[in-house]
Image (spheres, grey):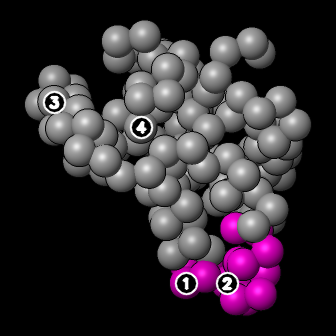
Amino acid sequence: MNDKYFIDTNIFVYCFDESNTEKKVRSLTIIGEALQSGKGIISWQVVQEFLNVSTKKFVSPLKAVDAKSYLQKVLFPLCAVFPNLNIYQNTIEIQEKTGYSFYDSMIVASALSQDCSILFSEDLHNGMKIEDLQVINPFV
């Protein structure tokens, strides 16, 4: 894969899902390739969502030391998008155009801000094209 791509929160969550081996393996592959190639990107929103879910909602929540380690080794190295006025303005426009929720629209706006051509997400419509961004559900 030569283009930059954005990774939604659910991909990170599946890395810890022992009940679905197929999704876990696919997620680990996507994130491993992202770290190795430098082409995978996330936003501060993905970092926040993952840390919240992983420390509160997992069957076996991550301990603080493990969450901090994952943040340092995986999440932060991939994080290239931080809050700014353009992200918020584009989020509102995308929400109006697509009917997506505010937070899903913010994921799209973040991906577009980094000129990503692919958004890996299970939550959005597989195959949907938003400007130059293609939504791909990596599990179908």
Between the residue at mark 4 and the residue at mark 3, the CA separation in whole angstroms equals 13 Å
Q: Earlier in the sequence, mark 4 or mark 3?
A: 3
Q: In front: 83, or 137? A: 83
Q: Earlier in the sequence, mark 3 or mark 1?
A: 1
User: Where's residue 120, x and y in %?
Assistant: 58, 32
Who's the residue at 77% across and 15% down the image? 1
Q: Is residue 59 magenta?
A: yes
Contact (Cβ within 8 Å) of mark 1 with mark 2:
yes
Query: What label sits on residue 61 in the rendered view?
Result: 2
Between the residue at mark 2 and the residue at mark 3, the CA separation in whole angstroms equals 36 Å
Between the residue at mark 1 and the residue at mark 2, the CA separation in whole angstroms equals 6 Å
Q: Earlier in the sequence, mark 2 or mark 4?
A: 2
Query: What label sits on residue 110 in the rendered view?
Result: 4
Image quadrant where residue 129 sits: top left
Amino acid carrying label 4: it is Ser
Amino acid carrying label 3: it is Glu
Who's the residue at 57% across and 72% down the image? 51
Contact (Cβ within 8 Å) of mark 4 with mark 1:
no
**Which structural element holds mark 2?**
loop
